[in-house]
Image (cartoon, coloured by chain):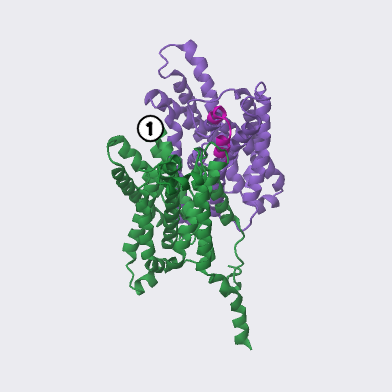
Chain colours: A purple, B green
Amino acid sequence: MTAIFSAKHSSSAQTDADPQPSAVWTKPVCLSLLLAVVSCVLFISLNAHGNWDFVIPFRSQKLIALMIVGYSIGVSTLLFQSLTHNPILTPSLLGFDALYVLIQSVLIYFLGTVNIFTHQPLLKFGLELLLMVGASLLLFRLLFTRSEQSLSRLILVGIVFGVLFRSLSNLVARLISPEDFVIVQALSFAQFNTINTTMMWVSLAVCAISAVFVWRWRYQIDVLLLGRNYAINLGIDYQALTLKLLVIIALLVATATSFVGPVIFLGLLVCALTNRISRSMYHSERLVLVSLVSIICLVLGQALFEQVLGMAGVLAVVIELLGGIVFIALILKQYRKQLA
Amino acid sequence: MPISSTATYIKPSKPKTKRSPLLLNALSMLLLALLILMSLSLGVADFSWSGLWQAITQQSQSDDLQLLLVSRLPRTVAIILTGASLSVAGMILQVVLKNRFVDPSMVGATQSAGLGLLLISLYFPASTLLGKMLFATLCAIAGMFVFMRLIKYLPATDILMVPLVGIVFGGIIEAVTTFMAFQTESLQMLSIWRFGDFSSVLAGRYELLYLTGGLAFIAYLLADKLTIVGLGDAIATNLGVNKQSLIWFVILTVAMISSVVVVTVGAIPFVGLVVPNIISRMMGDRLRRSLPAVALLGASMVLLCDIIGRSINYPFEIPIATVFGVFGAAIFLWLLLRKPKPQPPINEGT
């Protein structure tokens, strides 16, 4: 699986002969930054009809939420792909966000929706994050410790874990009172137009802190991409770095899921796009690029569907549709490469 | 004496593969009978067997008899037909595709049937149940056909790729369906088909399911030929079996069974996957021998899950799709994660 990464790596190094290999402000990054700014302006201004006093606070709140979601999903997926040396895997394909929904439902089951955390949503979010990190570390261990694991078995096991988590959340939803049932049901559907913004500032903080750490580790992650044995030989503390990255991934998945619910294919879609338009495999470029691409997809997509086409809730479905097609195309392409 | 030593070496494994299907089926039958009794006596409305007995012996109309005939018995029959036919559909699909990890919802059949059902409900809301079912079947066939074309590009060596692509393919069709339902404000209608539930089964609303029983029986009649198709192209050709028409038969059967089930009770995941895997582990893939056992166990498992769903949060009901989703996913995970059997020494190092 590293073949795809490394092949691209070497070919781009030969053809481009980049003088500054880890530069950030490359052409694709600048262009997508421009496009991101344009989509944000469009998102705020389309069909505003001059009601700025209402529109700007209302839409900018939503815009920030979409940007947080985009950043979280994009970066967590890219890190996960580097960690597993695989351009097809994503945390949500392996059931990580279904896991978060299950954690939320189980908490509601044991505590009820009106509970000690009602006046302290921060504490509740913190508890959820903590549980999520623990549970996803366990899941990751379970999925990745078997040495004879093939890629298809891994993804299939992950998807079925996702189905299991969803069925369990559903079971929990049925066992609680009807009022709580509505809340648990709402957790398990992806929605971009009704975003839960109570946790916005905390999530923003989570994103910012994670960004600082990931940015500091970017060269180590570059080395990680070469493969486990190379990374260890080059002096990377493999275990520790894996653990740190997994904690960040779990936090980001939880953040994104707490905003919009589980979105299975968005991460795959934006990472596939990023890998296509990025000139190098260096994380200093790709981390920025993947966040921007992800934000463009969400903000521009939502602006388009909500204001131009008048179909507010469709973006999630369209993303799942496109992402599914990209996934199948990636798999077929990979096999053609193996046969050749 | 080398010959006798090999003979004793082979011996212990022999009775394992030849476990008597008669005994197994008898046990299965007993279990099913027990579950049927439980299913008939479980429910919110008052129902007593003594009241029923009085009604029958004294030739008088009573509520108990009415309840049995209108609600309890149809529900139980519907469950048995659904479980048995879905399992049989899964089994023949697995044998013909030579892949243990597929079931009707992993080849796009169930999801395409749902899409077809939505389409006909939107454009021809006045059509009869039979018409809806026929159109859903056509869509299911089309969906499976596209899927068959798609998996031709996958390597034969990686059997898990087929269910993986199948799940994603089903997801794509479901996304299209959701999109259309969202635009036409019929999400509620959709969620009923997407989620198997026997609570709305009453006399007069489940009879289409008998069709699936008939299809499962035809599959049993063709069992030997289907087994031969499962042995491979060369063997099938040599034994004079028309492979193409049999594959069409399987596609048609699987599509019809899944669309009838979707139309009458909704989608139930994993039934066609888990049951055939259990049976084939116990008695192999000779369909003539294993199909009755598959049907029996399928009926028992769905019935058991329905009883669990009805009693766990009594008097409320948990849809069978949820209960079976939990059990089925757990069993499927076990199938995927269990340690592979130790390979014979020839394969070592490859």
Q: Is residue B42 above or below residue B255?
A: above
Which quadrant of the figure has residue B219? Answer: bottom left
Quarter assignment of residue B15: bottom right
In front of the other: A68 or A224 = A68
Report the chain holding disc 1.
B
Residue B243 visible within the image: yes
Residue B173 on the magenta segment: no
Q: Tag 1's secondary structure?
A: loop
Most frequent secondary structure within the magenta stretch: helix
Q: Nearer the viewer, residue B7 or B68?
A: B68
Q: Residue at x 63, y 38 (%)?
A: A250
| Magenta stretch, residue numbers | A168-182
Task: Reply above or below: B309 against B341.
Answer: above
Q: As rendered, which of A96 and B3 lies closer to the eye?
A: B3
In this rendering, the answer to whether B314 lies above or below A4 is above
Q: Is residue B296 left or right of residue B176?
A: right
The location of residue A94, given as percent across then percent down, is 56, 45
x then y, percent, for residue B251: 36, 56
Residue B58, percent across and down? Answer: 43, 46
Identify the residue under disc 1: B186
Q: Is residue A334 visible?
A: no
- Crowd band around label 1 with a 10 angstrom C-alpha radius: few (<14), some (14–19), many (20+): some
Task: Report the number of numbered marks.
Answer: 1
Residue located 69% across and 51% down the image = A232
